[in-house]
Every structure is written in C-alpha cells, then in structure tokens.
C-alpha cells in the first residue's frame, strides 16, 4: 500500500475539484439537481472545501436526475479529460454507482489491480433510490441490498478478505455470472423506484444506521456552498443531514482515525 505525500494529496484534490466543477457545469447547463454528500458535504461546511486528509469526493442525485446525468454525459462530458463509468457501460465494473474519472491518471485501489477496467482518479456519483416507507419492509429491503452488494463485491472479496472462510464464500458467490447479477440489480433498482417514498438511499452502499436511509427532501432542497473558492450545491438542511450522518460533525476525529483509500499505484 502506498502512503500519499502531502504534495500528492493536494494534487489529487485539485484533480477531483476539476471533476466536481465539470459535474457542476453539466448539471447547471441541463437543470439537473445534484448535491455534495458525505465527506464532501462535511468538508464544505467544516473546512470550506476538502477535509484536509480526504482523498475522494462524493456527489448525490435522486435516481431520475442520475439517469438524466448519465445519458447527457454521453455527449456533454469533456472526453478530452474525463470518462464516466458505471455498471451498465463498463465490463467488469461491479459497483452500483457511477464514477467520473480523469484520463491519463492512475488511482489503483489496493486489492483491485485485477479488475478489468481503467482506474483513474475519480469522484463518485451516487444515485439515491426510493426505499419502502414501512420500517419492517425497509429492513427486508436493506437485506436485499446487502446480498446483492456482497455478490458484486465477491470479485474483490475472494482475493482480499482477511478470513479464509469469507474468501471461500466470496469464491462461491463469484460463480454467479456478472451479467446475471447486473440484470438483477437493474430490476431491483426499477422495482425500488416504482413509486416515490419519504426516504432514499444508495442501494449498493452500506446504510449509515438503522433508519436505513436519508430524507428525500435533503436531495431536493439545496443551497450553494463555498468549496475551495467555488460555489457548489449542497444540502440546504446541512446541520440536520450531517448530524444524522456523523453525530457531532464539527469535532474532528483523532489522527489515527483519519482514513484514506488504500492504493497500490498512483499517477497524477
């Protein structure tokens, strides 16, 4: 695993900022609603930009906005510099959300060197899907999310999980054909979005707590925030969202808990 130098981290963040601005440009031009989420939203509020040790950036969109965005990217994204990946357009890609990546860079995740697609510096684009209003149905829905996610992850887990038994389980799950699980995921997304609900979530990303989702209104009611000297959109009720997600979000974690992605190769 490579430990990034401060110089590398700053350059990485600059590339990610350029991609955030490209997303902002496209979304403004085509009236697509997006919002900074997770650590990027936290960074905007607490630091006015990136969390100093953060090495990625996250954007969220309600499903209908995401579908418009991925389609418009086919003609609007500046392909001299960037490319868009998700499981529907990239063979071997096994994540349930999209990525904008920078051409002519490498950000190789440790343990994912065998994945058969380009792995440039990225920002994540998360579609937020509807989840059931009734809690007990939402609980079952969460277990389905978990199961599909682990099948997708099996291509990595069979090599990287620290426990021998888990690696064996992932090897078994990995026998499910890629196209079959992707077809199942697509059907699951369609079913989840058959009607609008109070809560939404990233289906193929762990839920933050036992609510199993986030308020839909957080992704609809937006405000402009300063981010590294630029104006980007974020959740208007930032305090409610960040408290829900992180608790006392203004308290910075101890140095030993400031995690970054483990990488085995980086070219900027």
Image (spheres, rainbow, N blue to C red):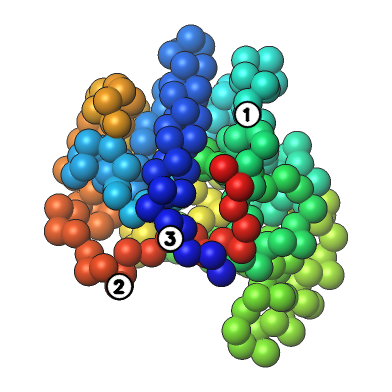
Name the residue tied to disc 1: 82
Q: Would residue 38 appear left or right of 3 to someone viewing this image?
A: left
Q: Residue at x 74, y 84 (%)?
A: 168
Q: Quadrant of residue 167?
A: bottom right
Pointer 1: residues within 10 angstroms few (<14), some, or many (20+)?
A: some
Residue 239, relative to residue 103: is it above or below? below
- Place of residue 59 in the rendered image (x, y in percent of width and height, measured from the top left): 44, 37
Q: Residue at x 67, y 22 (%)?
A: 79
Is any part of residue 186 visible from this angle?
no
Name the residue tied to disc 2: 256
Q: Secondary structure at mark 3?
A: loop
- The N terminus sits in image quarter: bottom right
Q: Which mark is residue 110?
A: none
- Place of residue 92 in the rendered image (x, y in percent of width and height, measured from the top left): 78, 52
* Residues at discs 2 and 3 in contact (Cβ within 8 Å): no
| Mark toward the start of the polypeptide (1 vs 3) | 1
Q: Nearer the viewer, residue 238 or 250?
A: 250
Q: Nearer the viewer, residue 22 or 87?
A: 22
Name the residue tied to disc 3: 260
Is any part of residue 29 visible from this angle?
yes
Q: Gap in Å between the C-alphas at discs 2 and 3? A: 11 Å
- Place of residue 203 in the rendered image (x, y in percent of width and height, measured from the top left): 53, 51
């Amino acid at each position: 695993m490579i430990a990034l130098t401060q110089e590398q981290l700053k350059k990485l963040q600059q590339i990610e900022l350029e991609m955030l601005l490209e997303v902002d440009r496209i979304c403004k031009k085509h009236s697509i609603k997006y919002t900074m989420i997770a650590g990027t939203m936290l960074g905007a509020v607490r630091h006015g930009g990136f969390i100093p040790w953060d090495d990625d950036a996250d954007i969220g969109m309600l499903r209908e906005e995401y579908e418009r965005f991925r389609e418009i990217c086919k003609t609007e994204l500046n392909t001299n510099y960037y490319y868009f990946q998700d499981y529907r357009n990239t063979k071997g890609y096994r994540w349930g959300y999209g990525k904008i990546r920078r051409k002519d860079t490498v950000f190789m995740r440790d343990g994912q060197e065998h994945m058969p697609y380009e792995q440039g510096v990225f920002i994540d684009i998360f579609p937020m899907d509807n989840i059931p209003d009734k809690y007990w149905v939402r609980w079952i829905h969460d277990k389905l999310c978990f199961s599909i996610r682990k099948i997708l992850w099996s291509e990595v887990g069979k090599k990287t999980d620290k426990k021998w038994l888990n690696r064996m389980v992932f090897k078994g799950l990995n026998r499910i054909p890629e196209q079959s699980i992707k077809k199942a995921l697509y059907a699951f997304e369609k079913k989840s979005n058959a009607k609008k609900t109070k809560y939404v979530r990233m289906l193929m990303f762990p839920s933050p707590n036992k609510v199993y989702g986030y308020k839909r209104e957080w992704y609809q009611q937006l405000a402009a925030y300063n981010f590294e000297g630029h104006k980007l959109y974020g959740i208007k009720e930032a305090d409610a969202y960040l408290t829900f997600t992180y608790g006392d979000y203004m308290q910075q974690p101890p140095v030993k808990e400031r995690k970054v992605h483990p990488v085995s190769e980086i070219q900027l």
